[in-house]
Amino acid sequence: MPNHCEKIWFNGKIVNWDQATTHVMSHGLHYGSGIFEGVKCYTTSEGPAIFKVHDHIDRFLTSAKIYRMPTPFSKEELVQGCLDIIKENGVENGYIRPVAFYGYDTLGVHPKDCPVQVSIGAFDWGAYLGQDALVKGVRVTVSPWRKFHSSSFPTTAKANGQYLNSMLAVQDAKSKGFDEGLLLNQEGTIAEGAGQNIFLVKNGKLYTNEEDSSILMGITRETVIKIARDLGYKVRIGRLSVGQLLSADEAFFTGTASEVTPIRELDQRPVGSGGRGPITERLQTAYMDAVHGRNPKYTSWLTYVHPASNNDLANKNDGSSYGASAQV
């Protein structure tokens, strides 16, 4: 059974999945000249809602701008496209993939007058690294491939061709029996997973790295930092070493698809207790409460598929804090 939905938003219209086609000589296929986003929709008591869709589309358009790709649709049209494809397919929980790429006009490296095509698909994706991984954690290996430096590619852009770097890392990890690869940057400090940002926990404090570590500035990363600070945890941002990861009390990945996934092992050496730690579990629970609309403090992060819900729930947001502060 395919995990994709029957309908897809293709260049401004909703069509059948098989009708969303492009030519094999498209510039994007030959050079990876495209940009994309990953967005999640979750079920809530008020119907399906898309989590931080405005932030994702902002980053989508920023990626296009960095690559000088003229996107033929506005932010409002793209947000509405995400809502429409969820509504059309009757999705409650799902993954949304906006993508823009150059079609065919020339096979030269310069895209010249290649048309920009835009699609938004919806998929029935479960936990990216496996449902068990959310509880048991994942086994990770340091990749022999380094994350590219910002002097080679703009690390803040989410561009198609750049993910060949991640593909090599995850292929290597899987071939060795691990769940995911961990990329170091050109300086030898930790960058990120093949598709996730990373956090460490040590003595009740959280540690994560910054843009100068050659990372994509993740929207889930930003969300977890906000939630952690709201819960009373201190979050330190700076470079991370493999030694820090091995000596951490806990570690976890964050990402739209991965959500909050514990890291239990690095190259056959346990991280902390070798399972999901208590702080990771608390943040994981708080994150899932936010995306499912169970915490009124964060309802502004949700865009409800049924428009009346957006107005109704905005009025319900009382700004109350979530949970008790942690001891730090």
Image (cartoon, grey):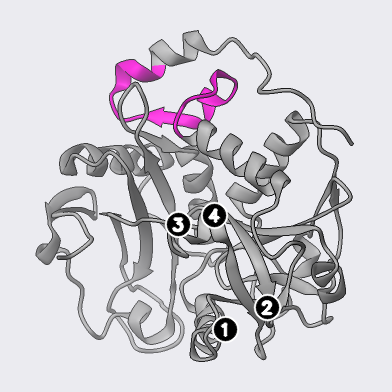
Compare marks 3 and 4 and give the one earlier in the sequence.
3
Cβ atoms under marks 1 and 2 closer than 8 Å:
yes
Label 3: state its secondary structure: loop
Magenta part of the chain: 292-310
In the displayed structure, 173 sits above or below 8; it is below
Cβ atoms under marks 3 and 2 closer than 8 Å:
no
Label 2: state its secondary structure: strand
Q: Nearer the viewer, residue 141 or 38?
A: 141
Q: CA distance from mark 1 to mark 2?
A: 7 Å
Compare marks 1 and 2 and give the one earlier in the sequence.
1
Q: CA distance from mark 3 to mark 4?
A: 26 Å
The residue mark sitting in front, 3 or 1, is 1
In the displayed structure, 279 sits above or below 229; it is below
Query: Could you tell me which quadrant the N terminus lies in?
Result: bottom left
Per the rendering, the mark at residue 287 is: none
Task: Left or right? Give the position of 237 relative to 56.
Answer: right
Q: Residue at x 52, y 32 (%)?
A: 289
The residue mark sitting in front, 4 or 1, is 4
Give the residue at mark 4.
Answer: 135
How far across and how far down the image is residue 264, in percent? 65, 66
Give the residue at mark 2.
Answer: 183
Q: Amino acid at mark 4?
A: Val
Q: Is residue 62 magenta?
A: no
Give the residue at mark 1.
Answer: 169
